[in-house]
Image (cartoon, rainbow, N blue to C red):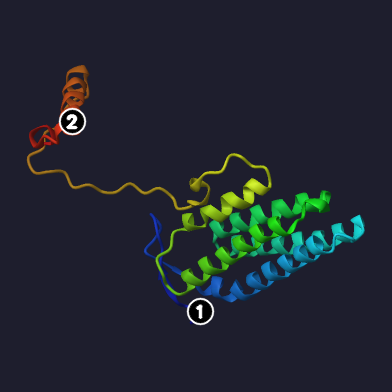
Amino acid sequence: MSPSAQAPVAGNAPASEDLGPLAWVHGEIQKSVDTAVKSLRRVAREQGLAHEEAAGVLRMARQQLHQAVGVLQMVGHAAPARLLGAMELVVRGFVDEPGRCTDERVGRIEQAGFALTDFIGAVLAGKRVSSVALFPQYREVLELAGNERVHPADLWNYPWVWAEVQRPQGHRTMVYDPAVRSAFDRDILRVVKSGGEEAAR
């Protein structure tokens, strides 16, 4: 893919973005995630490892993820960086308690890594993808870290932009007072109950 490739972006972001920086770092990010997962698998499967040895392997895995987080932030992709940051948070917990690094937990981290790779690949292929598509894996990983407050909006990083609405012909400006509020509430209720066109107007 050409470094100057452009792709559409979901949400209220500009219609296109420069994908060159992401294309340049994509391979390194994937390599960092793969290396970290292999290290986690080693600790999960070799339960005979001494605590210090296991903690050392886990620290290296955490460092790999930490660096990948920084790279994604640097190239302006905050949502996938958040997912990687959540993975790093879980691995940080494993460093303190290597016994918590089980095959099942590593499998969930690995699935999050696959989702991240697929997401970045789709962005680079010019597909319209929303960062909120990463939410199922983001939630799964944060649940491993014991974080109960997880919301899709955590991954929605586009600035809000008001839509410009054309005023209808012949509109008249009204002062918002109790009488207008009462009429507004009454007509909204009619629209909700019966879909009345006159009330909608």
State left or right for residue 162 relative to residue 27.
left
Q: Is residue 153 above or below residue 1?
A: above
- The one of 77 and 90 positioned closer to us in this rendering: 90
State left or right for residue 184 relative to residue 197.
right
Q: Mark 1–mark 2 contact, CB under 8 Å?
A: no
Q: Mark 2: which amino acid? A: Lys
Q: Residue at the location (19% across, 27% down)? A: 189
Residue 9 image position (x, y, % from top left)? 41, 63
How dense is the environment of label 1, judged by Cα within 10 Å: few (below 14), some, or many (20 and up)?
few
Residue indicated by mark 2: 193
Q: Residue at the location (39% across, 61% down)? A: 14
Which of the two marks, 1 or 2, is nearer to us in this view?
2
Looking at marks 1 and 2 on the same chain, the residue that comes earlier in the sequence is marked by 1
Q: Is residue 31 above or below residue 50?
A: below
Residue indicated by mark 1: 3
Residue 172 image position (x, y, % from top left)? 11, 33
Quadrant including the C terminus: top left
Residue 71 image position (x, y, % from top left)? 64, 65
When asked about the image quadrant of residue 35, the answer is bottom right
